[in-house]
Structure formats: C-alpha cells, structure tokens
C-alpha cells in the first residue's frame, strides 16, 4: 500500500482511530531522540496541550509518558498518592473500574462509590461518601466513560473536590480535544489523555497536564521506575524536551502534525461540533432502524454510542462486524457485562458522508440479515 492509498476500511473505534494521511506521513521519517529538532517537537507538543487545557505555563506543565492511556492513569495514581492518602473513585464504567484495579494492585487505600453504568456521577452522593470516609484525600474520576459513551459532569464534581480540599485527578482520555476542559478553572491537579483519541494521533504515549505545585510535592512517592511521573517530568524540564527513556519518535511526530490539524479545523470547539453532529445523526438514524442507545440523550457524550441489540431479532455480532468491515467500516463490540450491546465510535477522520454511508449499510444489513 502506498501512502496515497486511502484506508481499506475506516475505524469506528475510539482509538486507534482513523487518522489523516498527513498525520501518518510524518511517521516516514526516523528521528533522533536527543536531536534539537526532535526535542523542540516535544516542547511544541507540551506547550500546545497546555493551551488546549487553558492552563498557564506558570502553574501547569505537561508530562508525556510512553505507553497507552492506561499507562498514564497508572503513572498518575501510583506516583501521586502518598502512603497516607486515600482515593475516592466514583465508578460508572470499565475505566473507573480499572482505576480501582490499579489502586488495589499498588496497595493504595481507596473508596469506591458505585453508580449505574447508564447513570451520571452524582456530586451529592460523593458528598455522602466523603462524610462517611473522612480519610479520603484524593478524588479520581473518568470524564467520558468510553465503556458506554456517557459523559460525567466535571463541574459539580470539581466543586466537591475543591470544597473538601482533595487532590483532583481526571481521566479525560476520550474527551480532551473535543470537549472543552478548563483545567485551571476546574482546579484539576492531573488531567490524563492519550495520543490516539480526540487529538487524532496514533497510539504510543499518554500525556498528563499537571499542576506544578502538586506535581512537585509528589517527588519520591512513585512506586515504579518506568511510570515515575515526577522523574519523567524532571528530565523533560531539565533537558528541554528530552524523554527519560526511548521515546516513541514516530508517534510524537505524528501527534505534532495532528495538533496542527486540530488547530486548522478550528480548535476544540469546531472538532466538538463535528463529533456532536455525527453522534446525533448516528443515534437518530440507528434508533430509526430499531437500535436503541443504552445511554439517555441527556447523558450521552459526543464520542461513542452503545447500542442495545434490537428486541426480538437475533443479532450475530461477529457476522455483522465482518460484513460491515467488508463494506468499509469497523465497529466495536460492547463492553457492558450484563447487556448485549455493540458500540459505534465517531471520532477520528469520520465525516457526515461517512455517517450517511454507515446508516445506509446498517439499513441494508437489517434488510438482508435481521428479518
Ligand atoms: C482509551 C481510554 C483509556 C485508556 O485505554 P488504553 O487502552 O490504555 O489506551 C482510559 N480511559 C478512558 C476513558 C479511555 O477512553
């Protein structure tokens, strides 16, 4: 396949996702990690991310971390929590569940507050949990639960964190870059996202937007060498953009290009509008075909939608997935434990005409196979 070839199929999965040819093209150059050009690229990425987060360089700093998004989450949780800290985790999907697994594994004290997976995190219930657990010092939440497509309300939750003087950690993996998150105004201490979500880069690293004062206070707390957030930051600062260990050079170059393309599209607001429009059209079109969304419209985020299997008809996901792939689109299996669902993501290089094609394909599939 030459680089001018389009994809044989497009990904309706929220990372990896369909990237532009120009983003992919950046990966054709082999770059040297200690070269000034490359370090400047790293610094450009760090600065641009701060701007997207509305964070001033005097109070915030970006740390890039090798690995997928989970590595970023584990880096923050295992580096920021001290021996006497206790983390409150509101759980309403697989990614908040994973935060608990990470805390468990590292032997970090935590309290989980469970919500339905089609239910938003409720600030009042967090207040109750805090009243029952005065030992809590950190609040860690997932913004957009990619499990279901539900988006949590950061503002009400941030108020709880602020009022109780808690360190505030946000996994904004699948929202950052498409949903405006004002890190400073929300008083976020650590925001985590990754290269292959709404910024539309390729997989290979995560990034953390950290409040400097909080980050500085975490020195020496890390429980691992490779995910030591403070050590990673210190090297990037001291050596002006040098990564601590081998950096994913191709991925960083692609990401720098993706950031430029986000800017050209009109920034976070414009990208958010494109995603929201696609998401709405998909929800409505699929519903008309008999596929009910799992999450109510009020809680639905603009990134991915979970659809229930149509009632009274047998659906073979494997077959449907294969048929759609042959016709140019790859969908995602469901991630709910108790309901039969599948998911359609709409982030990446997916536009209105794609949505129309996808809906036409589903209509055809229903006609031929879902009698
Ligand atoms: C993608 C994602 C992650 C990270 O998953 P990886 O598979 O490690 O990239 C974490 N949280 C949320 C909400 C996500 O969407």
Image (cartoon, rainbow, N blue to C red):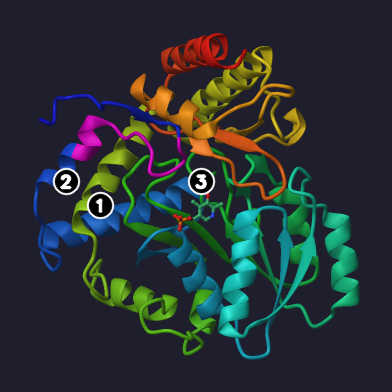
- The answer to the question of whether label 1 and label 2 lie on touching residues, with beta carbons closer than 8 A, is yes
Q: Residue at x 24, y 38 (%)?
A: 23
| Disc 3 target residue | 176
Q: Is residue 143 magenta?
A: no
Residue 9 drawn at (x, y percent) = 32, 27
If you read the primary sequence from the N terminus, does the residue marked by circle 2 or circle 3 appear first?
2
Q: Which residues make up the magenta segment?
A: 13-24
Question: Between 368 and 239, which is closer to the camera in this rendering?
Answer: 368
Q: Is residue 242 above or below residue 10?
A: below
Q: Residue at x 15, y 65 (%)?
A: 33
Q: Is any part of residue 327 visible from this angle? A: yes
| Label at residue 16 | none
Residue 163 drawn at (x, y percent) = 80, 66
| Disc 1 target residue | 251
Residue 19 drawn at (x, y percent) = 31, 35
| Disc 2 target residue | 27
Secondary structure beneath disc 3? loop
Q: Is residue 160 above or below residue 291?
A: below
Residue 211 drawn at (x, y percent) = 53, 67
If you read the primary sequence from the N terminus, does the residue marked by circle 3 or circle 1 appear first?
3
């Amino acid at each position: 396949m030459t680089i001018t070839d389009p994809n044989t199929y497009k990904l309706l999965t929220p990372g990896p996702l369909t990237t532009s040819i120009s983003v992919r093209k950046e990966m054709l150059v082999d770059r040297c990690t200690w070269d000034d050009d490359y370090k400047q690229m790293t610094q450009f990425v760090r600065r641009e991310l701060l701007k997207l987060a509305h964070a001033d360089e005097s109070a915030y700093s970006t740390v890039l971390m090798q690995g997928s998004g989970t590595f970023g989450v584990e880096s923050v949780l295992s580096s920021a929590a001290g021996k006497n800290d206790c983390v409150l985790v509101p759980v309403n999907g697989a990614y908040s569940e994973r935060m608990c697994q990470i805390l468990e594994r590292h032997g970090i004290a935590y309290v989980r507050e469970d919500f339905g997976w089609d239910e938003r995190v409720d600030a009042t219930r967090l207040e109750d949990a805090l009243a029952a657990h005065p030992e809590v010092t950190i609040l860690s939440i997932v913004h957009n639960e990619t499990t279901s497509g539900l988006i949590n309300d950061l503002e009400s939750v941030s108020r709880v964190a602020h009022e109780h003087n808690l360190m505030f950690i946000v996994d904004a993996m699948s929202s950052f870059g498409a949903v405006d998150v004002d890190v400073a105004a929300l008083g976020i201490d650590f925001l985590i996202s990754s290269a292959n979500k709404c910024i539309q880069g390729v997989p290979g690293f995560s990034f953390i937007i950290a409040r400097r004062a909080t980050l500085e206070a975490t020195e020496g707390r890390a429980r691992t060498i490779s995910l030591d957030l403070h050590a990673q930051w210190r090297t990037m600062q001291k050596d002006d953009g040098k990564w601590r260990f081998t950096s994913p050079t191709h991925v960083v170059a692609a990401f720098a290009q993706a950031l430029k393309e986000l800017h050209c599209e009109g920034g976070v607001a414009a990208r958010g509008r494109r995603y929201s429009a696609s998401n709405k059209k998909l929800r409505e079109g699929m519903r008309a075909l008999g596929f009910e969304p799992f999450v109510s419209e009020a809680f639905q985020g603009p990134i991915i939608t979970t659809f229930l299997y149509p009632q009274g008809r047998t659906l073979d996901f494997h077959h449907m997935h294969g048929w759609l792939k042959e016709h140019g689109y790859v969908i995602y299996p469901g991630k709910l434990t108790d309901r039969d669902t599948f998911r359609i993501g709409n982030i990446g290089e997916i536009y209105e005409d794609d949505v129309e094609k996808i809906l036409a394909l589903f209509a055809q599939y229903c006609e031929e196979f879902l009698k």
